[in-house]
Every structure is written in C-alpha cells, then in structure tokens.
Image (cartoon, grey):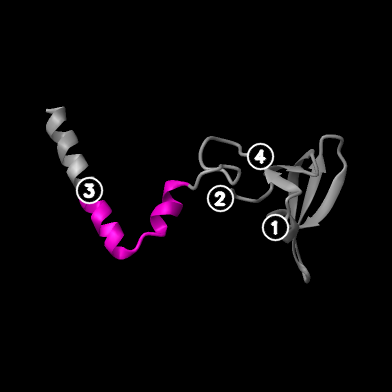
Amino acid sequence: MSAGMVRLGVGTRLVYDGEAVEVIEMVATAAGNEVVLKDRLGRMLRIAVKELLFSDRARVVPDGPGPSPADEEDVASAVLSRLSPAERQRLLERVEHVREVRMWNAT
C-alpha cells in the first residue's frame, strides 16, 4: 500500500462495507474521535475514526488526481524520505547534473 495521504473531514467520500458514504460530521468523544457517515439513501452511521483508518472495510474515494492510499506504488516523497544522508547527497548531485544538461540543451 502507498503512503499517500487523504484529508479525513466533513465532505470526504468513502466506500464502507461496499456502500458509498460521505462524512457529514466529526465528533470528539471520551472514547476517541468519531465520524457520522451518510449513505445515498440518507441512512446515517456513527463510527470510530480508528475503525476507518485501520479496517479493510473502508476505502477513501479520492476527489482529485494525485497520490492515493490505494496506489500500488509508493509516492516519491515516501521513497526519498527513507534515504540516508549520504544517499540523499548523491541523489542531489545527480539531479544537479541533470539540470545542467537540460539547461545546456535548452539553449
């Protein structure tokens, strides 16, 4: 699974137990944060955020292009964050060489 992130808040669309739902309310309780979900028939369900985040029963429906938790590959930022300082320095040097060649070819 990817390390892509999605904001969870009012208006976020999900598929929960195969049903399309939308977050219509966020609730803070003594037991933890919960959300109120509304399906296409107007039925409402109150569920713990923890359940949405860690369950295979829920999947976020992305509202635009970009990284998604359903991506099969890691996004570049996740891969680059795992580099050691030495690896990061070597990569930066290579990037500078590529930029230099691109600028030379653009003229």
Range of magenta residues: 75-94
Which residue is disc 1 drawn over?
54
Q: Residue at image x 79%, y 51%? A: 36
Q: Earlier in the sequence, mark 3 or mark 2?
A: 2
The three-letter code of the residue at mark 2 reads: Met
Q: Residue at image x 51%, y 44%? A: 73
Q: Residue at image x 12%, y 33%? A: 104
Answer above or below: position of 74 versus 65. below
Q: CA distance from mark 3 to mark 2?
A: 28 Å
Front residue of 103/40: it is 103
Residue 99 relative to residue 5: left or right:
left
Are there few (<14), some (14-19), or many (20+) residues within 10 Å of tag 3? Answer: few
Q: Main secondary structure of the magenta part?
A: helix
The three-letter code of the residue at mark 4 reads: Val
Furthest toward the bottom, the residue is 30
Residue 47 relative to residue 69: left or right:
right
Q: CA distance from mark 3 to mark 4?
A: 37 Å
Answer above or below: position of 92 versus 18. below
Are there few (<14), some (14-19), or many (20+) residues within 10 Å of tag 4? Answer: some
SS assignment at label 2: loop
Q: CA distance from mark 2 to mark 4?
A: 12 Å
Foreground: disc 2 or disc 1: 1
Q: Earlier in the sequence, mark 3 or mark 4?
A: 4
Q: Determine which of the numbered discs, if any, sits on residue 5 in the image.
A: 2
Which residue is disc 4 drawn over?
61
Which residue is disc 3 drawn over?
94
- Residue 100, position in %: x, y? 15, 40
Q: Earlier in the sequence, mark 2 or mark 4?
A: 2
